[in-house]
Every structure is written in structure tokens, then in C-alpha cells.
């Protein structure tokens, strides 16, 4: 028997892990656990980077992306969904009910209707107000064309990574620079079952105030998420364009397939991103990794990222063990 494990990005994921862990610990399906954890964030309007609470694009419209994966032959994703909040469940339907991997836009919403998922308004009142203030005045020290960066407030800090920098009614702790940088992020969840099965999922509303039509790394297999039985699983969060350009999640697992430990694999990918891109102060990447036996690591490019670990001792917020550029 394998010791069950869940890992998730950002401290707001703890509520979802608390819902999903009991069944996983009793021998449940790891993908069931991942979907349940993601859905908790998708329906929580205080989480401003996922689902109903997420911040819209520059036009004020919402679109959601998600991906699920058991293996290279079992994966599904959706992007630019505008009428359904349960995008992680929808991605699973794509995996299990179609011969395809990804559906996009209006056809994805149509497929969701066929699968019986309810339509809903995707834009919470607080998110609408944050967008309005951002678009009109740049309240919060954040002009509409300024760079953004998410900062995790930690346990008990709520789900907001961006409010207070976008014209919302909450503030984020940190330096003046940090308060300018709330943007993008994703819930990514990894799960290891008692029988050794692996699964992963991620869900996002994408970069805050993104250009309409922008799709990031989260729904693309091998970019934001990759799972390979017998090897391991990885989820990335942060600046999606950096993840996309480096195929980061796949690169982590490929390094492990070649013999690297989770720490070596994640560290090497962070270093590669550091070398390949002209990084700016607002750029952040978080990578969480587990091998097939449950040996895991939480890593980040800079300070401000946290994750949640769940096992037989319950769930708890954890700090990265590797930060490539601490103090920045």
C-alpha cells in the first residue's frame, strides 16, 4: 500500500483539500480528489484567480480554463469557457466522454450543456468592481498597463492574491512593490492514491485583466500539468507565458524519468526558465512535484508562493523548500 498524498498550489487550496482528503485516505480515486479540491476554489468568490471569484479580462468578460490528467493517454482540457464554472469537471468529461483532449470556447460551453453542467454567471460582484476600478483609475497603485504579481497571504489570509492592487476592497501585505503585483494564478492539485494511482488537475481564470482571447498554460498538457504513471506528476503556477515557453511541467517529469529527484528536476526547470527568459521583478513561478512513491517538493522562483500538503496528518500550508531567488 502507498501512503496517500495531496499537494496543491496556494494556501487558498486548503479548504478543497479538507473536502477531498477523507475519501482519498479511505482508498478513493485520486482524480475524484483533484476535481473536488478544484471545484471548491471554482465556487469560492473570495478566490480571485479561479472560477467565480476570478478577475476578468481587460474588457470585463470572464473566461475559464482547466485540465485533468491521469497519464499521457488519459487527459482532457477546456479553455475559454464563458458560461460554466465547473471547468475541471468539464475537462474530465472531455477526457472520458470524447476521443479528444481539448475543447475551446463556445463549443466547450455547448458540450458542458450536453453533459448536464449548469450554466452560471462567472463574474462575482467584487471581481466586477475590481475590474471597473482598474479600468477607470488604476486604484491601488496599479495602472492598467502595469505589471502584476500574485502574493500568497498565507493561512487564514483568504483566497485573494490580487485584491488591493486592482481596485478591490482588500489589501495585500508586503512591500510597496509587492502591492503592485497581483495577477495570474491557478489552483493546481496533485493526488497519489493508496493503490499508487496518480492524478492531477488545474483550474484558472487566467491572468487578471488579460487581453481578450488569451489562454495560458493551465489547460495545455505538459505546460501547467503533467502526470506519468511510474514516474511522477507536476503542476506549475505563476506567469503562464514562462511556463508555456519552457513546457515546464513536462520538463520536470522528463528530468525525473531520466533519473533526477523531484528537487533536482524542479530546480533544474526553474534554472532553465531563469536562463531562457529576461525575467522581470513581477515574474513568479511555483512548481509542486511528487514522484510515483510520494517523494515531493514545493519550489518557487521568488518569495510569495505557498502550497498545501495533505496526508494522514491532515492538511497544512507549507513554504517552498527551494526558492531560486530568495528575497526578491
Image (spheres, rainbow, N blue to C red):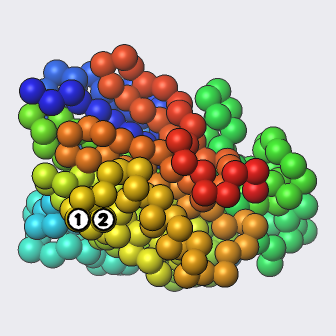
Locate residue 220: give its quadrant: bottom left
Residue contact at pointers 1 and 2, CB within 8 angstroms = yes
Q: How many marks?
A: 2
Rendering quarter of residue 40? top left
Residue 214, label in figure: none
Q: Is residue 181 visible in the rendered structure shown here? A: yes
At a point 59% along the width and 72% down the height, the residue shown is 274
| Res 92 seen here | no
Q: Secondary structure beneath disc 1?
A: loop
Identify residue for label 1.
Answer: 258
Percent position of residue 38, x then y: 39, 45
Report the Cα–Cα distance between label 1 and label 2: 5 Å
Report the residue at 28% width, 53% height from top: 233
Residue 73, percent from left and from top: 11, 67
289 up-or-down from 295: above or below:
below
- Furthest-top residue in view? 313
Q: Answer few, some or many: residues within 10 Å of disc 1's Cα (few below 14, many 20 plus, some between 14 and 19).
A: few
The quarter of the image holding the N terminus is top left
The foreground one among 134 and 112 is: 134
Q: Which residue is mark 2?
A: 255
Coordinates of residue 25 in the picture (x, y in percent): 22, 23
- Foreground pick, 320 / 223: 320
The answer to whether 260 appears left or right of 299 in the picture is left
Q: Secondary structure at mark 2?
A: helix
Whole-percent x and y of residue 52? 52, 51
Q: Residues within 10 Å of mark 2 (few under 14, many from 20)?
A: some
Residue positioned 37% across, 17% down in the render = 313
Amino acid at each position: 500500500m502507498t501512503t496517500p498524498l495531496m499537494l496543491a498550489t496556494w494556501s487558498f487550496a486548503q479548504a478543497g483539500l479538507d473536502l477531498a482528503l477523507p475519501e482519498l485516505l479511505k482508498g478513493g480515486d485520486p482524480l475524484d480528489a483533484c476535481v473536488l479540491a478544484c471545484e471548491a476554489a471554482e465556487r469560492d468568490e473570495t478566490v480571485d484567480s479561479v472560477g467565480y471569484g476570478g478577475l476578468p479580462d481587460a474588457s470585463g468578460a470572464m473566461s475559464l480554463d482547466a485540465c485533468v490528467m491521469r497519464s499521457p493517454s488519459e487527459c482532457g482540457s477546456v479553455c475559454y469557457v464563458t458560461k460554466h464554472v465547473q471547468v475541471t469537471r468539464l475537462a474530465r468529461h472531455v477526457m472520458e466522454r470524447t476521443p479528444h483532449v481539448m475543447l475551446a470556447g463556445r463549443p466547450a460551453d455547448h458540450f458542458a450543456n450536453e453533459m448536464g453542467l449548469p450554466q452560471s454567471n462567472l463574474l462575482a460582484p467584487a471581481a466586477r468592481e475590481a475590474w471597473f476600478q482598474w479600468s477607470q483609475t488604476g486604484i491601488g497603485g496599479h495602472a492598467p498597463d502595469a505589471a502584476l504579481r500574485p502574493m500568497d497571504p498565507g493561512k487564514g489570509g483568504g483566497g485573494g492574491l490580487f485584491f488591493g492592487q486592482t481596485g478591490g476592497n482588500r489589501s495585500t501585505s508586503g512591500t510597496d512593490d509587492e502591492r503592485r503585483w497581483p495577477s495570474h494564478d491557478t489552483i493546481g492539485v496533485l493526488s497519489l492514491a493508496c493503490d499508487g494511482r496518480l492524478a492531477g488537475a488545474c483550474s484558472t481564470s487566467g491572468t487578471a485583466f488579460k487581453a481578450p482571447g488569451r489562454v495560458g498554460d493551465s489547460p495545455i498538457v505538459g505546460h501547467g500539468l503533467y502526470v506519468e504513471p511510474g514516474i511522477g506528476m507536476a503542476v506549475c503556477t505563476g506567469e503562464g507565458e514562462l511556463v508555456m515557453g519552457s513546457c515546464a511541467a513536462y520538463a520536470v517529469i522528463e528530468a525525473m524519468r531520466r533519473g533526477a529527484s523531484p528537487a533536482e528536476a524542479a530546480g533544474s526547470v526553474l534554472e532553465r526558465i531563469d536562463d531562457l527568459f529576461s525575467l522581470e521583478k513581477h515574474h513568479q513561478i511555483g512548481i509542486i512535484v511528487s514522484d510515483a512513491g510520494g517523494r515531493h517538493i514545493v519550489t518557487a522562483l521568488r518569495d510569495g508562493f505557498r502550497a498545501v500538503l495533505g496526508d494522514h496528518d491532515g492538511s497544512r500550508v507549507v513554504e517552498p523548500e527551494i526558492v531560486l531567488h530568495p528575497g526578491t
